[in-house]
Image: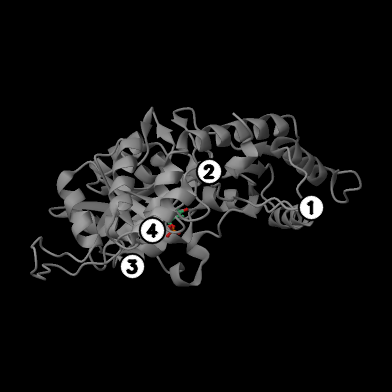
């Protein structure tokens, strides 16, 4: 069906390799679509039949229980989306107005927005080519240069502001080198937060992501590996933080049969039961989703093998990735080639995407502090995300 393709021979080869991997002739293939093959209808209907659709109900509690069980985290607290879950994470680790929070420049906008909404100032650092996440060595060298440890903690010598935390993002589901980052955080007295929005099902050295920092956030947006329509969660192994997360993400009301005493300014970010019902049904299929996505990644890898000029991105050796979004990289950093290719792919119905525009290029974050970002800037020009729905993984 690719006969008659016009365009550079390399572009044609990529389209053919993609079609071979995804095994479908469908006229358009989305980047990522949800899959509802479990008990979604039953659970959602139960909410409507019983009237439990809002912020209280058995599915919210069940969803949190199952999330904790699946990820191995002691506490999971649901939220209406991943952005606010991350915002609460920032508050939980003590981010205060005017504190800087380190995060990668190569990430989805939600990471930076969550920092901003918590009162923090995003401070962008570079990533490495092995994980696409924060480069631990570059980070350490950078902090040695710009940071100063004083009585209370870590300060940015240039801005005078406190650097409170670091958000490690598992980009496209690929775990970052958490041990190395945790060590640097401990040396520089920074709180480690994981933005695990994309990495449900991904393991770092055998342990599920979201378990290595003080707190972590998940997302269940429609394009993530598991969806609740919209949704998110906070993970933590610290019982006190878990309690605080639940308290803040509701209305911070002290437990009492009738009295409305609220001891803090709560957020009302709790996930409705209706959404949690969808999430419970989705979580039951988690193992299938992960195996299908890993099978698809393997097929991409073999289809792209031997294609001169591009390379399929593979999980780092210490990780088992959910391959949320597959990606390949052009050998040459050429935005003209990248954009011409995207145009070409879309003409042939393949909804591929470039990497996100780096955070420091966006108008609202242009003046934020940042490290040298040359690896991120190079990757931005070369990276393409491939169609990655679990359905494309076929029967496994
Ligand atoms: C999806 C995502 C989030 C959270 O997104 P929501 O749409 O608010 O659920 C946060 N960080 C990253 C890296 C994401 O991909």
Question: How far separated are the C-alphas under marks 2 and 3?
Answer: 26 Å
Q: Tag 1 or tag 3, which sits nearer the N-term? A: 3
Badge 1 is on which residue? 348
Q: Nearer the viewer, mark 1 or mark 4?
A: 4
**63 horizontally vs 336: left or right:** left
Image height of 47 relative to 193, above or below = below
Q: Which quadrant, please, contains the C terminus?
A: top right
Q: CA distance from mark 2 to mark 1?
A: 23 Å
Q: Which residue is mark 4?
A: 49
Q: Earlier in the sequence, mark 1 or mark 4?
A: 4
Residue carrying label 2: 324
- Whichever of callouts 2 and 1 sits on the residue coming sooner in the sequence is 2
Q: Quadrant of the N terminus?
A: top right
Q: Residue furthest front?
A: 49
Q: Look at the numbered disc 3 and give the secondary structure of its residue.
A: helix
Earlier residue among tags 2 and 3: 3
At 47% from the left and 57% from the top, the residue drawn is: 229
Circle 1 crowding by C-alpha within 10 Å: few under 14, some 14–19, many from 20: some
Answer with mark 4 or mark 3, whichever residue precedes in sequence.
4
Q: How is the image coloured?
A: one colour
Q: Residue furthest right?
A: 4
Closer-to-camera residue (2/80): 80
Q: State yes or no: Cβ of the residue under disc 2 lies below 8 Å from any atom of ligand 1.
A: no
């Amino acid at each position: 069906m690719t006969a008659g393709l016009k365009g550079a021979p390399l572009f044609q080869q990529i389209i053919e390799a993609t079609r071979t991997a995804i095994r479908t002739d469908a006229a358009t293939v989305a980047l990522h679509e949800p899959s509802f093959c479990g008990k979604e209808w039953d659970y959602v209907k139960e909410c409507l039949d019983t009237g439990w659709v809002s912020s209280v109900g058995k599915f919210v509690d069940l969803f949190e229980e199952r999330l904790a069980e699946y990820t191995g985290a002691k506490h999971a607290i649901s939220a209406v989306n991943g952005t606010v879950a991350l915002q609460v994470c920032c508050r939980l680790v003590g981010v205060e107005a005017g504190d800087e929070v380190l995060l990668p420049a190569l990430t989805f906008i939600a990471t930076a927005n969550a920092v901003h909404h918590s009162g923090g100032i995003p401070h962008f650092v570079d990533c490495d080519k092995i994980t696409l996440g924060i480069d631990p060595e570059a980070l350490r060298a950078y902090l040695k240069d710009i940071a100063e440890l004083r009585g209370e903690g870590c300060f940015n010598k240039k801005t005078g502001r406190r650097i409170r935390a670091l958000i490690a993002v598992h980009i496209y589901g690929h775990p970052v080198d958490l041990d190395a980052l945790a060590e640097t955080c401990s040396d520089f007295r920074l709180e480690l937060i994981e933005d695990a929005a994309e990495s449900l099902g991904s393991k770092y050295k055998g342990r599920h992501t979201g378990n290595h920092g003080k707190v972590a956030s998940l997302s269940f947006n429609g394009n993530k590996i598991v969806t609740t329509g919209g949704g998110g969660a906070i993970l933590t192994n610290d019982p006190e933080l878990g309690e605080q997360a639940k308290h803040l993400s509701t209305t911070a009301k002290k437990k009492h049969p009738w009295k409305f005493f609220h001891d803090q300014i709560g957020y009302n970010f709790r996930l409705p039961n209706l959404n949690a019902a969808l999430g419970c049904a989705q979580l039951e299929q988690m193992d299938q989703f992960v195996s299908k996505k890993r099978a698809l990644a393997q097929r991409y890898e073999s289809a792209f093998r031997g294609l001169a000029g591009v390379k399929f991105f593979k999980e780092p050796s210490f990780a088992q990735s959910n391959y949320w979004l597959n990606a390949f990289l052009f050998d040459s950093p050429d935005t003209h080639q990248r954009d011409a290719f995207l145009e070409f792919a879309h003409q042939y119905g393949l909804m591929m995407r470039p990497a996100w525009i780096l955070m420091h290029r966006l108008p609202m974050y242009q003046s934020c502090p940042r490290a040298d970002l040359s690896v991120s800037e190079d990757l931005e020009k070369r990276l393409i995300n491939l169609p990655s729905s679990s359905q494309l993984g076929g029967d496994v």
